Amino acid sequence: MKNNNQGFALIAVLMVIIIALGVGLAYVTLKNKSESSPSPSPTLTHFTSTPTSTASTNTFPVTTPTPDVTQNWKLYTNTQYGFQFKYPASWKFNNSAPAGVPTIQFNSNGIGVMEVSLIPDVVDNFYGSNFTFQTNITIGGQNAMSYQSNDEFNMTGFLIKSKKMAITFYDQDNLEIKAIRDSFKFTSTQSQVYENQYMKVSIPTGWSYGATQNGAINITKNNYVLYINPNTGGSVGPVDDLSGLTNGSPSGDLVLKTEPYRGVTCGDFAQSNVTSKLARFDGYINNNGRKVEGGRVLCDAPATDNIVWYFSYITTVNDKDNWIYIGNRCYMNGIDSSTEACQSKTFAITMSYKTNMINNLPSEGSSELQRMLGEMTNIAKSVQFK
């Protein structure tokens, strides 16, 4: 009995040891596994929005910019009168305006398309049954009125009374007209005023001047010379007695080699009105104008048939029944009246070209000559005799 109890006790001890070993082994195994396998990170859930496809979508109007038709155009600037505007690159500038009316002209394929004219009584000159007018228009910040001709010329344009300006188009596209009108800007004029005891004159930029004897003045630009003498001793005309006028002028002395007899002229003179009181006479000559008498050369001339300009002068309109008053002085053909109301003085306004070669004189009708004659005439118009 005693032996049986000891056997059971031994078996019980062995079972306890085996269980303990099993538990320990399981513990060690689980511990190693937990150390070698990291714990799983918590899962982050990201929420994204997925656009819902619908049959219709919201759209916004897209504005297409209006093309700038003036992008490749040229810019015309006039510093004398203070304005500028753009014009199509295909147009050609042509300053062949009549004397006394400052006008800027443009041609396209040889046909006139646009004019800008500076006219003192601009509005009165355009009123009439041939035009339809519309007011309440602004050009370059100035009040203006548009007009349309009611005839076959199909003229469209604008009148700016404050600037004494008329802008005229001939058979032009309305889009181009509007673009030119919108590009107009008025700028400050660039000129200086020369004044002495006898006269006052406005000299625009680009021109220089020098005073001479007796209160006279030479105003020059490139080779062009404008001479104004408020106290000359002789008359400024007529054309058959030019020796006194041309004496001392470069191109005049080239042509008039000897004082011509009264009634002898060199070349031909064209008259144009400057104002209602003044006229301009332009002298032209070619090889047919050469005159020799008794071996003495009266008139020299270029060697070719090309007609050239050599001299111009401005005088009062020839009205033998009325004296013309300019400022405080009155004239007829440039000579003051001998009455007590006027001083016994005369004036001379001449235009010439500085060269010592007669074949280098400006050609008749050239754009440069017309432009320079126009500029000299405008300067002469600004003269105020005292």
Image: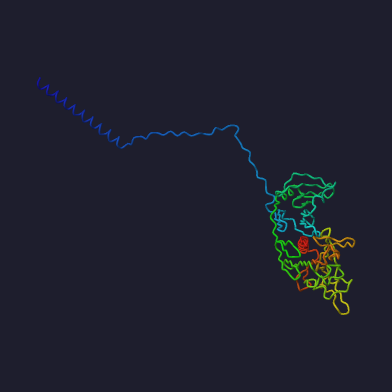
Q: What residue occupies the far top of the structure in this picture?
A: 1
Q: Residue at x 74, y 49 (%)?
A: 177
* 131 sits left or right of 217 in the view: right
In the foreground, 212 or 237: 212
Above or below, comparing residue 168 to residue 229 in the picture: above
Which quadrant is the C terminus positioned in? bottom right
Which quadrant is the N terminus positioned in? top left
In the foreground, 380 or 7: 380
Q: How is the image coloured?
A: rainbow
Above or below, comparing residue 7 to residue 106 in the picture: above
> What is the x, y in percent for residue 83?
71, 54
Q: Looking at the rendering, which quadrant does residue 385 occupy?
A: bottom right
In the foreground, 216 or 256: 216
> What is the x, y in percent for residue 307?
82, 68
Q: Residue at x 54, y 32 (%)?
A: 52
Q: Report the number of numbered marks.
A: 0
> What is the x, y in percent for residue 360?
77, 71
Q: What residue occupies the far front of the structure in this picture?
A: 340
Q: What residue occupies the far bottom of the structure in this picture?
A: 295
> What is the x, y in percent for residue 274?
82, 60
Q: Looking at the rendering, which quadrant does residue 343 occupy?
A: bottom right
